[in-house]
Image (tube, grey):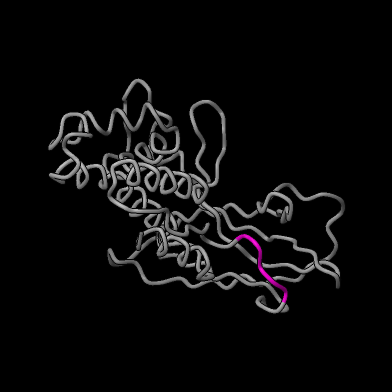
Amino acid sequence: MPTYEQFGNTLTDGIAGDRRDLLAVGRAAEACLNLADYVAKDPACRDRVPGAPKSKNYVEQLTQQNHWFAVTRDIANVFKHHAISRTDRNIDSVDALKEHVALVRFADSDGYYYAMRKLVIVSLRNGERLYVGDILYECIAAWIRELMRLQQIPSAPHLKRVPTRLVCRHDVPRQPSIEMRAEQGEYFESNITVLEYDSVNDTYGSLRGKLEKVDFKVNWSVAKSRFGQTTSK
């Protein structure tokens, strides 16, 4: 799915701000949701899809059957409508999604090394906080199983998590850095945290032990306002 790959590329481009990461999330989530429309309209699937060629009943069925599709559906809809009020919703609005910049500690035979990574985290109404990349991955994996059930694909294609969690030492600069982009007069929020790579579960978790001194660079790039002269108080 191209939008999923684009999401992964955006999270590794080293640039924070301009809602780049959130917009990439929205495009990928909408693609996952809109796939239901294409499947429902496909004549080859009509006997197996409830309510075809319309997708409303099919979307409801997928929502009930798969938690990851349900969350992805809600993410897509908050980007479209800003807020949703469906009774069984997992999130209330686009404000449930937050962009984060993380200084991540990795370890190899030579000791610790660090890299700057970007993450998008969604806070569900039940209190869970999840990496959006994991949600999209699981939703696409569910779609692969569904398309195999509908006999639209013969076998499961290889699906990788994006962006890749493990970063090798030779792939990161000696001094980790991130570029923060903002615009004059614009409210800019960035959540910076320190995490540690968990090699057993291939994920990021809370830092264990003491954090040694780490030098990293934050480059600010502030553009002129698109709305003319700005004033500050």
Considering the image in quadrants, where does the N terminus appear? Answer: bottom left
Which residues, given as a range, are shown in magenta?
165-169
Q: Is residue 114 left or right of residue 43?
A: right
Measured as percent of width and height from the top left, residue 45 is found at 20, 41
Q: Magenta stretch: residue 168 in it?
A: yes
Measured as percent of width and height from the top left, residue 208 is found at 82, 49
Q: How many marks?
A: 0
Magenta-colored segment: predominant secondary structure: loop
* Residue drawn where x is 30% and y is 48% of the image: 30
Q: Quadrant of residue 5?
A: bottom left
- Please tell me whether residue 54 is drawn above or below residue 203 in the rendered image: above
- Please tell me whether residue 7 is drawn above or below residue 140 in the rendered image: below
Measured as percent of width and height from the top left, residue 193 is found at 66, 53
Q: Is residue 86 left or right of residue 102?
A: left
Q: Magenta stretch: residue 124 in it?
A: no
Measured as percent of width and height from the top left, residue 102 is found at 64, 58
* Residue drawn where x is 64% and y is 65% of the image: 116
- Please tell me whether residue 190 is drawn above or below residue 62 in the rendered image: below
Q: Residue furthest top?
A: 87
Q: Nearer the viewer, residue 67 or 11?
A: 67
Q: Quadrant of residue 61?
A: top left
From this viewpoint, is residue 196 visible?
Answer: no
From this viewpoint, is residue 157 visible?
Answer: yes
* Residue drawn where x is 82% and y is 66% of the image: 112
Q: Nearer the viewer, residue 98 or 74?
A: 74
* Residue drawn where x is 39% and y is 41% of the image: 72
